[in-house]
Amino acid sequence: MVDLEQAYLDKGSDYSPRTQHLDKQGRAKFVNHLILESSPYLLQHAHNPVNWYAFSDEAFDKAKAENKPVFISIGYATCHWCHVMEEESFDDVKVAEFLNKHFISIKVDREIRPDVDATYMNVSQLINGSGGWPLNAVILSDGKAFFAGTYFPKKQLLDILLQIQTLWKNEQNKVINQAHDIDKILNKSTVTTKVGINKNIVSKAIQAILDNFDELEGGFGEAPKFPHETMLLLLIDEQKRNPTDDLLNAITTTLDTMASGGFYDTVGGGFHRYSTDNSWLIPHFEKMLYNQAQLSLIYTRAYQLTQKPLYKRIAKQTLDYTLREMQDTNGGFFSATDADSEDEEGTFFVWSITELKNVLNKEEFKRFDQYFDLSTYTDFEGNHVIRFKDVNDINENDYKKIDALLTKLYKLRIKREPPLTDNKVLLSWNALMIPSLLEAGDVFNETKYTDAGVALARYLDNFNKNGQLYRVSINNELQTIALSEDYAYLANAYLSVFDYTHESIWLDKTVQLIDDMMQKFWDKKKFGFNMTQDKKYLNTNYKESYDGAIPSANGVAYKVLVKLNYRVNGQKFFKQAQQLLSAFSAEITQNPYNYSSFVLGFNNATFEELSNVQYAYDGRIRIHTQRLNNRVVINLTLNPLWHVNSNQPLQDSLIATQVNNLDTKHWTITQAIYPKGELAKLGFSKDEISIYKDKVSIELKLEQHSEDYHSPSLELTLQACSDKVCLPPTTLTLKP
């Protein structure tokens, strides 16, 4: 028997119990089994009078032995409504007495066990048509659920629990049968028709997204507004390929309004989780690592697409905030910061006029008022969110003056009581940061981001211990076996490191991860990756297919397999990608709106990749394109024993290495500098030929001749040869 009081004492003098039930010495009156856990969310509930257990054999065995239903409550450490329900109900003695007498109670951190969360979220969606957090369910001792819902006020919760307890006492078989019926529906074996996905799926997905576009305020759908990063990434990719005014307007309107302030933290950088209104003004103030990772990547790519200085500013500020305030001393990034501080939502982030006048002198306040909206429009419970009047009215040169004002606010703000930081380091969310850092370093030509991305990839190697990949690190201690999401995201991250370093070890790591993922999670009959290997008490094989706040594991895996097909010689990954796509083809075809990750991967598979790093001839040639103002540098790296013809081959029959301008309407190549070819005599030719091998750099100088900016569109023509054979010529589209 574990001594819970001793576990409490072992926490030490710095430990602060989170409860209203304290004795005169400030010690908690209650301690439950969650004191044995390391999750910040579970520890928040360790001193509730509810006798909580973790999701464990102990809890389910106890429920079975005592013939009690299980009350399971799922949330996360920075969830505002989880805090509300904790204070109202779970820290209430009356609620606790009822739960302790009639139920076995389990707490789950959804960020550590998204597989558990997904299982009971599906039940809530089935019963109520909706879900959210806290997610509360009542289940049998075998894990099957017969009730689920979200936040309940104390009185409603007690009424529900009383009804369930009465049913359990008087009509237990009816309750058990209901749980089995729900389980059958969730596990109903449907014959999924695998349909062929054709090229019009891209335009269908784009149109579905644009149909939901808010033309006034940007974003997609009604409030509460989430950034829907995967949709934005797809729109940017398609705008690169097939630019239209409608696409560009949807991208820029959304990014401009999100960057204006409120949803974006203008003082400290970084984005909140979502906006409670249509205008991106009043956020739900928690900050999640996955938002910083995805939105910094979006603004980096949007800058490359438009050259708009605002987007560069937002991308860099977001990454700088994340590096400054969310990175732990070991190198990983914390998962989130709370919405609440000083027991109120948003207190850390909002300002009164009096505070602003105290920190800024009269002239500074006047200047501040010139740029920022301090009207009742920006009011949040008597204070103000900091929002630009019109972010597009600001001259790039004005930002120096603006930043001087914001720095004064930031220096005062960091003295406030900060929101709680959830110090979990999650493998998948950290992996999301790596491509964002690497791409920003490349596009902005800043090595601090590139170095940080590579360093993070090396740090994440530590999540693999004795051949087993883990999902979570808390206080540098690994726990929880990795899910398919972790494998997919990490493979994508490693592939990004390979692209930007061209060190083969990272490609080898990617291939190994995908092979392990196939072995552990692949459904050999129906295809697709299952979410977890550990199905104990979950009773289902759940597959993440559609994008939510983070991209679906299967969507990311599909993109990785497509990319590997370009980088590795052989058809293995192409076949796996096709099988994976086919597993979800019916759903994607029916509703492409929710499958942006898959559609973006399909774009890459069907129309080639459009990124700074591309490959030709099954990875034998790497093409790295960099844009530096009106100069474009195209660096070719060729595998040993392979070469391409130079720009001026000596024989008319050979195809020259050549870059052509595909957009003469907006750009002119004023100068093209090709290196001099190297003379070589090859086995299949009697004559000397002029070639490029190893590393080659081509430099172009461009001149724009249109008022509206359009990213350049170039075409690179190559023909690869070895000493024995010449392969057919190929062309690649470059969009620097």
Image (cartoon, rainbow, N blue to C red):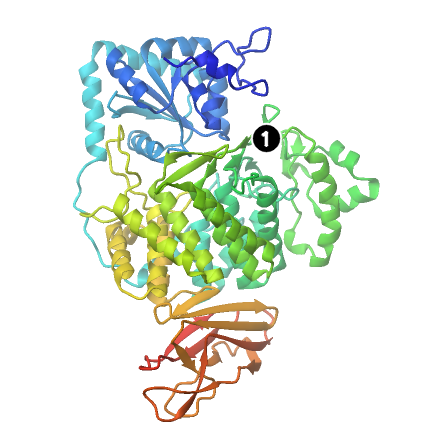
Q: Residues within 10 Å of mark 1 (few under 14, many from 20)?
A: many
Q: For the N terminus, which image quadrant?
A: top left
The answer to whether any part of residue 294 appears in the image is no
432 with respect to 598 (left or right):
right
Q: Quadrant of residue 106?
A: top left
356 relative to 306, above or below: above
Residue drawn at (29%, 20%) of the image: 60
Image coordinates for residue 638, horizontal then vertical, percent: 43, 73
Q: Which residue is mark 1?
A: 419
For residue 58, what is the image quadrant? top left
Looking at the picture, how far across and down is residue 419, in whole percent?
A: 59, 30
Residue 28, can we see it? yes
Q: Position of residue 587 (x, y in %)?
A: 27, 49
- Could you tell me how many numbered marks the image carries? 1
Query: Up-down: is 392 above or below 98?
Result: below
Q: Amino acid at mark 1?
A: Pro
Question: In this orientation, which residue lies closer to the viewer: 197 or 701?
Answer: 701
Question: Residue 553, how many percent across, how many down?
Answer: 35, 46
Depth check, front residue: 320 or 188: 320
Q: Is residue 560 left or right of residue 285?
A: left
The residue at 57%/44% (across/down) is 322
Residue positioned 49% across, 85% down in the render: 677
Asked whether 529 or 122 is in front, the reply is 529
236 or 623: which is nearer to us?
A: 623
